[in-house]
Image (cartoon, rainbow, N blue to C red):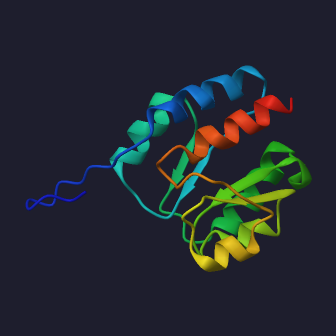
Amino acid sequence: WVDETGRESVAANRSDSMGIAMLRETGINSMVISKEVNPVVTARCNKMKIPVMQGIDDKAGVLLSYLKEKGMNPENVIFVGNDINDVPCFSIVGCAIAVGDAQPVALRSADLVLKQRGGHGAVRELCDLLISRS
């Protein structure tokens, strides 16, 4: 939401935080790569104790660099996206996931589509799915 003064607020599903914490306890880490630069995103990621990269136009390039720097096998990575700028990352990772309300190109390109919409429990849905299979 943006009010008449330009102050921005973002709704978040609080159960996502618990899902991320439970996922971390299983040894699975997460991070956020965002095109937007927004202090709300920083605050949310800080609360969930996950790294965040903002202002990223070339998500695929940043993802590849990050994986190389960390020595991670892309086949062991899951990428969750919702829009056209996420789709180039889908072919890099072992599993590409779209949230339920993603743009059609992301829905068509994903290996798995979550039932929940972005910001409405999609992260928790994925966390619960991963935890149930670990």
* Residue 71 in picture, x, y percent from top left: 87, 45
> In the shown orientation, is residue 18 left or right of residue 111?
left
Residue appearing at x 61%, y 30% in the figure: 19
Q: Residue at x 78, y 23 (%)?
A: 26
Q: Residue furthest front?
A: 115
Give residue 52's position: percent from left, percent from top.
54, 45
**Camera-nearest residue between 62 and 77:** 77
- Using the image, determine if residue 67 lies above or below residue 109: above
Q: Is residue 53 left or right of residue 93?
A: left
Outermost residue toward the left in this view: 4
Q: Position of residue 73 (x, y in %)?
A: 90, 49
Residue 125, quarter of picture: top right
Query: Which residue ends up furthest to the top in the rendered image?
Result: 25
Residue 33, by quadrant, is bottom right
Q: Residue at x 77, y 51 (%)?
A: 78
| Relative side of 54 to 64, left or right | left
Quarter of the image containing the C terminus?
top right
Q: Quadrant of the N terminus?
A: bottom left
Residue 34 in picture, x, y percent from top left: 52, 58
Say which residue appears at 43% left-offset and 62% top-offset. Answer: 36
Q: How many marks?
A: 0
